[in-house]
Image (cartoon, coloured by chain):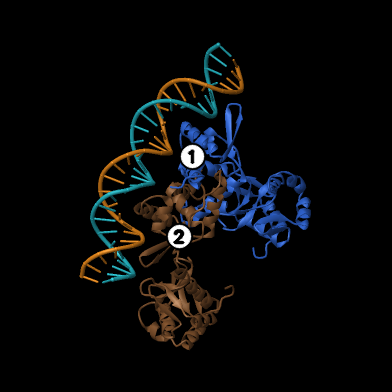
Chain colours: A blue, B brown, C orange, D cyan
Amino acid sequence: MKEGPDIAQVATLIGDPARANMLTALMSGKALTVSELAQEAGVTIQTASSHLSKLDAGGLLRPRKQGRHKYFSLASDEVAHVLEGLMGLAVGAGHLRKRTGPKDAELRRARVCYNHLAGDMGTQMFDSLIAQGHLVLEGADLALTQSGLAFVSDFEIDAEALQRARAPLCRECLDWSERRSHLAGSLGRAFLTRFEDLTWAKRDQKTRIVSFSDPGAVAFHRLFPVAHP
Amino acid sequence: MKEGPDIAQVATLIGDPARANMLTALMSGKALTVSELAQEAGVTIQTASSHLSKLDAGGLLRPRKQGRHKYFSLASDEVAHVLEGLMGLAVGAGHLRKRTGPKDAELRRARVCYNHLAGDMGTQMFDSLIAQGHLVLEGADLALTQSGLAFVSDFEIDAEALQRARAPLCRECLDWSERRSHLAGSLGRAFLTRFEDLTWAKRDQKTRIVSFSDPGAVAFHRLFPVAHP
DNA sequence: TTCATACTTCGACCCTAGTCGAAACATTCA
DNA sequence: TGAATGTTTCGACTAGGGTCGAAGTATGAA
């Protein structure tokens, strides 16, 4: 009956298993080529190409051509956010791909959500920033306080430069494993990058797992203490 | 490659146009029947029933059976949140839905629902009983508290006798004009009977309208005060 | 009881959309 | 230039699922 800009088109796009696998792989934040995504999805390159052009036409991807390679990444934080939300619903429905394995535990502890830190440690960081008064919830929005600005500067992140960019500095992202919020936005990205620069943590290329070194984890917990660990 | 929850299943669920229309209609927060949702989606009732059972199995809906009606609402805020995100991704504006319900103002105000009071005054009574602590929600069930028992006894209703009968004492009933809960069960029936005995109200046999006398309405509102009338 | 309403299940039709092989197109390198 | 690699397009096949008619079940009304 009523037609229009419906959520069905976008959801159908995400709904195909091959495309969902591709999008999940892109949640690592890395840009991947057609061949790589074909392997992730378990289909041939021709099929993958077809899927990717559809995802691109649907505005979910950002393609970048480099020589004879074509790199795809998620179009925006909003896309990643929706995907994370869908994962939460899938977990709630009990539709896990496989039973909880060792990799699953690592994923729950710390993983990459598009380009920022998610999992148990992600929510810990978020909670700690809130508890210390560095971050405040202003209605639906998230804002960095004065003390938060100083805290971030001490950690050698140039928040003011990030603020000048048009991308939102702080955003809340709902965690599918923890069902709680963690920090997204350009600040969330900056934190993860900083962790890597300090060699506190390392991203696994194949999975979305973020593995902290022992001294890195200690430093992390010193920086982001929580009341009841 | 196959880590994390399977977003494809839930996305496929949302991806069908008919189901997407249903979910969009439910974004109003109201509970809708199978027939209503069928009309919203532009499909037959059989098709709608099939879709709704799938959405339910996927954990996206919360069904409530009410006599020969079956009301569906979104399962949680998380579902609504994801749908909102999908709408954001879909280019273009959303569409407004037409409203449903009885047109007659008298029916909206007070009417008989099976054997108990429904309509605006019915939900007022329910809300007031909850607010005064006479009634509590215990999970999915509704229970009369100690103070509620005294309150009912003061109103000369023998709740203990009703409790001995096999019919449930308290039941939640979803209002078809207010789309909110009111009191059903044998206690709900007893309340309405008592209103009639006290000549506070009179029920019209043909139209289901319950008409309160002026002093009856005053007494009713004194007995069941609400915070924001 | 009998009828009416609301919903579910069954069966069959049909059509979209995912899939891959083959081949064309594009880019880099020797 | 030609060979190698990466990606896209075309065509045909096919499975899965959305659709509705008809029959079946459940609840309420007369």
**Label 2: element kind:** loop
Label 2 neighbourhood size at 10 Å, few (<14), some (14-19), many (20+)?
few
The residue singled out by tag 1 in the image is A41
Q: Position of residue A227 (x, y in %)?
A: 67, 65
Tell me the kind of residue under disc 2.
Thr
Q: How many marks?
A: 2
Depth order, front residue of B221/C8: B221
Residue B53 against residue B109 in the figure, above or below: above
Question: Dot 1: few (<14), some (14–19), or many (≥20) neighbours within 10 Å?
Answer: many
Query: Which chain is disc 1 placed on?
Result: A
Subunit ID for the residue under disc 2: B
A213 above or below C29? below
The residue carrying mark 2 is B100
Residue B2 location, x and y as percent? Answer: 49, 45
Left or right of A120: which side holds D16? Answer: left
Q: Residue at x 75, y 45 (%)?
A: A164
> In the image, B149: left or right of D22?
right
Say which of A218 and B176 sits in front: B176
Disc 1 marks a residue whose amino acid type is: Ala
| Up/down of B86 relative to A221, above or below | above
Mark in front: 2 vs 1: 2
Can residue B24 be seen from the camera position used here? yes
